[in-house]
Amino acid sequence: MTDRAGTPADPDPPATGGEEPRRRHWLRWTALGCAVVVLAAAGVGWWFYRKLDDNITTDTTAAAELEKYEKERPPAGTSAARNILLIGSDTRAGEGNRKYGRDQGTQRSDTTILLHLAAGKSSATAVSLPRDLMVTIPSCRKPDGTRTREQFAQFNWAFEFGGTACTIRTVEKLTGIRVDHHMVIDFRGFKKMVDAVDGVEVCLKEPVNDRDAKLKLPAGRQTLNGEQALGFVRARKSIGNGSDTERMDRQQQFLGALVNKVQSDGVLLNPTKLYPVLDAATKAVTTDPGLDSLRDLYDLARNMRSIPTEKVQFLTVPRRSYRYDANRDELVQPAASDLFKQLREDRPVLVTPEKENDGKPDDPGSPPSATPTFTGRNAAEGVCE
C-alpha cells in the first residue's frame, strides 16, 4: 500500500482504538451505577431515620408545667451524670390496652424507676420506687385544669393526679435529685420491646395461672414473648407471696435479663437486629423534649452498651411497712437518705445480693466502708440465677 506520492505508507495501527472509548464508557456507567446505589442507600437510610424519629411522642405538657416550678426544683448537676425517670403507665386507653381492664380515663404508675447514669459511663443504678410508698405529693395541675391540694398519700396517686410532671415533682421533693429526663411506656409498648428482641428467658419454680394478669405458664426455664412478659411483671397474687415487694424484685430481674439479652445478643451492633428494636422502642415511649429524637435515644443506648452488665444495678429504695397501715410503705432512714445522697453527688452505690447480707453487725476490728451497701442485683445475674 502506497501514498499518493508513491512511497510506502505507514502500517495501519492495531485495531484497539475502539476498546479505550468502550472502557471509558464502561467506567462511566459503573461510576454512575455506584453513585445511584449510594444515593439510594442514603435515601433509604434517611427514610428509616425519619420514620423512627417520627415514631417518638414528645411530652411538651410536662415540660411546660415543670418550667413553672423551676425555682423549687433541685439544681441541675454539674457532672455528666444523668437521672432518667422511667414510668410504667397502667392506662387502659390506646390500642391493645383495653383488654387489661376498663378505661376509666385515669392512669397510675404501678412501676416507677429512677435510673442514674454515672459520669464516665462507669455504672447505671436503677432504683424502684414502690407504688404504695407514703410521700408528700405537691399541689398539681389536673388534666381538666383544676389543681389538687398538697397531701400526704401513696406515691402512685401523683401520676393519676397530675401525670408525669406531678410524678417528677414528687420524686424530686422526696429525693432531692434533679430528674433530667423521663420516659413513659404503656402495656403495648412494653410488649413490643420484648418481641423486638425475640423474647426474654425466665425460670419459674412453679407453674403460674393468673387470670388477672392473663398469664398461664408451666414451671421451668422458658422464653417469654411480649404478652407473656407483660403478665410476668404484672402478676402479683399468683407468684410468690403475693406482695408488691416481690413483684418489684421480679420486675428488676426481668429488666436485668432484658439488658443482658440486648448486650450479649449483639443487637446494638447488628443493623438487621437493631432496626426492629429501635422501631419498637421509638413507638413505645413518650419522652421529654430532651430525649425525643432518634439520635438522643441511640446515644442513650450506646452509653448503656458501654457499661458492663455487672455494673448495671437494680435495687428498691430502703423501705418498710408504714407504721399506721401495713398495706403501705415508708422509707427506712438514714439508709434512704444515704442512697439519695450518693446518687445526687454521683458517688458509687454498692449493690449486693440479699444472701450476702446476713444481718450481723460488722466486725468491730474492720474499718467502716466509705461506700454504703444496699440489697439488690445486677444485670449479669439474669432471672435464672
Image: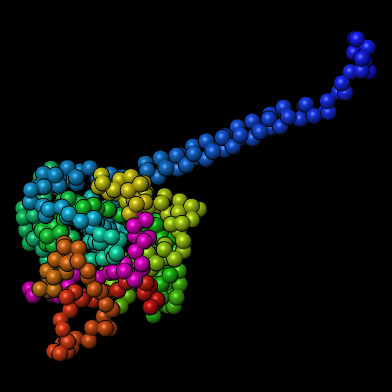
Number of on-image labels: 0
Q: Is residue 10 left or right of residue 283?
A: right
Task: Give coordinates of residue 235: x percent, y percent.
Answer: 31, 69
Task: Give coordinates of residue 85: x percent, y percent.
Answer: 23, 57
Q: Is residue 254 left or right of residue 141?
A: right
- Residue 273 visible, this orientation: no
- Residue 16 visible, this orientation: yes
Task: Give coordinates of residue 125: x percent, y percent.
Answer: 26, 66
**At x 83% / y 28%, what residue is drawn?**
14
Q: Which residues are magenta?
A: 301-325
Task: Give coordinates of residue 273: x percent, y percent.
Answer: 48, 55
Q: Is residue 156 left or right of residue 38?
A: left
**Above or below for 220 versus 230:** below
Q: Is residue 3 left or right of residue 184?
A: right
Q: Nearer the viewer, residue 167 or 175?
A: 175
Q: Nearer the viewer, residue 70 or 310?
A: 310
**At x 37% / y 72%, what residue is drawn?**
380
Quadrant where the C terminus is found in the figure = bottom left
Quadrant where the N terminus is found in the figure = top right
**At x 19% / y 45%, what residue is drawn?**
63
**Above or below for 172 versus 66:** below
Q: Quadrant of residue 196?
A: bottom left
Residue 371 in the magenta stretch? The answer is: no
